[in-house]
Image (tube, grey):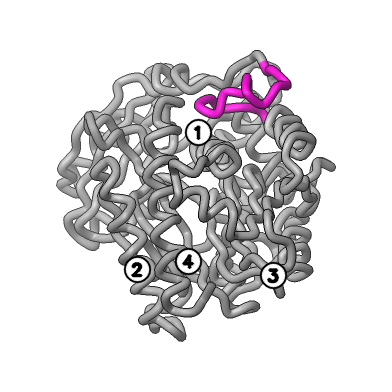
Amino acid sequence: MKLLILFVCSLSLIAAEPARFDNYRVYSVAIETEDHLSTLLTVNRGIGGYDFLVEPRIVGTKADIIVPPHMQDDFEELAKGHEFNVELVFSDLQQIIDRERPQQSFQRAAEDFDVNAYHSTEEINEWLYYLAEQYPEVQVIRGGSTFEGRDIIGININRKVDENPGIFIEANIHAREWITSGSTVWLINKLLTATDAEPAYKDLADNINWYIFPVVNVDGYEYSRNVYRMWRKTRSRQGLICQGVDPNRNWDSSWQAGGVGASDNMCDLDFGGPNAFSEIETRTLSEYILSIEDKLNLYISFHSAAELLLFPWGHTADPVAGYEDFYAVAEATVNALEARHGTVYRFGSINQAIYPATGGSIDWTFLRMGILSYCYEFRSRNTATGERYGFIAPPEEIQPNSEEVLDSLVAMVAKARELGHI
């Protein structure tokens, strides 16, 4: 029956009109016991089933679960049977999605490109090429290609060639996390326009060699924009009816079929793939990263949404080599992030702070290059009002999220310099 529902729902997504989520409810569920956690981790997820705006992580946190109308009775029985403490967050998810729909108009001039809106990959790439025409320190770079034949386009900002230490930023590897590319675009703009009146930001622009990729999972992002808003994976074909691999479970770092924190069911959202680097996106991007590894000092991955700063490892609770430095840099980073708007991040290893996971990009970059590697899980709510939105962040959240992240990058770089990593 699950496969039949999945097949029917998959056929419905072939239509030109984007899938809608009218009357889908979102509940906040307090994870108070291990039973609560294990139950949420094993619910029927994906197209036609439950999903999460905020993933279940560890006991003592909350998860925001998306409940389709046809599963409302099932959820009420589930909540009663496991004594969930639940709170209705949204009664109609479609209303939240409608708030974030991307702009339809695009102005080529950089000063007219709205960095506080969500754009298509094509629009973002056109803007990056425009920046390369306007700024001598900017070069458009190609980091790889995708299953559907698109290029993974990024930007290199370097004002002191052969002098500056390098930082790599990877965003939107999970297709539906639009705030990651939205904030990355905002950060690029701020780095290029920072003035002497903003010395901390100008220091980052002047003295760091930036490699920034706003959209890594291009196929998935475009599918999320145009067809199915909740899409997370790549778009490669898997078997007869399933598509896509979780690209942040596909890197060659403790990868194994059905490994810790990844699924071996090709229809699941966290399917790690048939083998490590099975996806052209992760394989070609990793090859590009290795081609510039002698220029890189730090790697950063942007995700949403959980208010977390994570570092290796994901596959084990054992501390990573150099744990003290990872911890010190993370602590300085989250303290600076909180100062701007009051957003509180927790920090720690992937395995301990969020959940066990294998095949992640920051584990691979540390494993292969030994550089400091961090993953941001951006804010899941409006810090000022408390409004919850998970990864479906309205466009007005781009600026405050970006401001606090930029402040945190200032602190991250300062602490990394102090400890000799930059």
> What residue did someone put label 4 on?
357
Instruction: Label 4: state its secondary structure.
Output: loop
Judge depth for marks 1 and 4 and give the one in front.
4
> What residue did someone put label 3 on?
295
Q: Amino acid at mark 2?
A: Gly
> What residue did someone put label 1 on?
48
Q: Nearer the viewer, residue 296 or 59?
A: 296
Q: Residues within 10 Å of mark 1 (few under 14, many from 20)?
A: some
Confirm or deny contact between disc 3 and disc 4 (CB under 8 A).
no
Confirm or deny contact between disc 1 and disc 2 (CB under 8 A).
no
Q: Position of residue 192 (x, y in %)?
A: 60, 41
Q: Position of residue 148 (x, y in %)?
A: 81, 41
Confirm or deny contact between disc 1 and disc 3 (CB under 8 A).
no
> What residue did someone put label 2 on?
348
Q: Amino acid at mark 4?
A: Ala
> Tag 3 or tag 2, which sits nearer the N-term?
3
Q: CA distance from mark 2 to mark 3?
A: 26 Å
Quadrant hosting residue 94: top left
Magenta span of residues: 106-121
Q: Amino acid at mark 1?
A: Gly
